[in-house]
Image: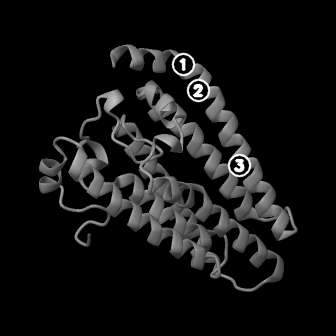
Amino acid sequence: MQQGLKQQVQQVPENRRKRVAAVLSVYLALGVVLFGLAGRLDWLMGWVLIVLLLGVAVLNALWAGRKHPDLLAERAVGVKAAKAWDRVLAPLVGVGGYLLVCVVAGLDQRFGWSSVPALLTWVGLGVAVAASIFVSWAMAANRFFSSVVRIQTDRGHAVTSTGPYAWVRHPGYVGMFLMVLALPVMLDSTWALIPGGLTAALTVLRTALEDRTLHEELPGYQEYASRVRYRLLPWVW
């Protein structure tokens, strides 16, 4: 196992380049969709979103990537290592839902179906920034923060209880839940709250399924769950 981990760490520079290229490709495609459907380039919040996403990618690389260099190798494993149900949910929650929010918001900009009070768009931006930082914090605290649900026996998977994990059991999903609900408001589209709400619901489902998996398969998780009661929302669930 140690030899495998060493090989993963040695592959980090290559994995980092591949991941940077993949992230840039996704953001380029997102920008094309967002501004192409909006039919205009002078959309302030559209540009703010792209800058925010790029900033988060840099933050993750500098914070989580440097703290846990082998995490980049793990996150490059792909959906083939995931639980069967997560091969469906991971792309829907991680990419598909956000893309659909941008599609609806872009069309809303073009056709003027709906609008959000200007002040609320800035509130949405604030929530999106806070949610992004919260996800990055969770990633930095947890060296097993995979992009898919799996028990990482090859990496000595253990319970993480520091940082935001001392408050809730799935802080990464907390950030994702808030982010996908903040984006429609930030992008000035009440219609985009429909795919945003559906993605938030799928995030709750994925949280429940992952929590059950960890209860059943990760040593020490049941004891941790008895101390940290809430999965996603403190005092709620």
Tell me if mark 3 has few (under 14), some (14-19) or many (20+) residues whose alpha carbon lies within 10 angstroms of its own: some
Q: Which residue is mark 2?
A: 15
Is 140 or 122 nearer to us in this picture?
140
Q: Residue 27 got which mark?
A: 3
First of labels 3, 2 by sequence position: 2
Q: Residue 11 got which mark?
A: 1
Left or right, residue 123 beside residue 222: right
Q: Amino acid at mark 3?
A: Tyr
Total marks placed: 3
The residue mark sitting in front, 1 or 3, is 1
Kindly indicate whether the residue at mark 1 contacts the one at mark 2 (C-beta within 8 angstroms). Answer: yes
Tell me if mark 2 has few (under 14), some (14-19) or many (20+) residues whose alpha carbon lies within 10 angstroms of its own: many
Q: Amino acid at mark 2?
A: Asn
Displayed quadrant of residue 5: top left
What is the x, y in percent for residue 22? Answer: 67, 39
Q: Which color scheme did the rendering employ for the protein?
A: one colour
Q: Residue 66 got which mark?
A: none
Displayed quadrant of residue 37: bottom right
Q: Residue furthest bottom?
A: 113
Task: Give the alpha-carbon distance from disc 2 to disc 1, as whole Å.
Answer: 6 Å
Q: In the rendered image, is residue 166 in sight?
A: no
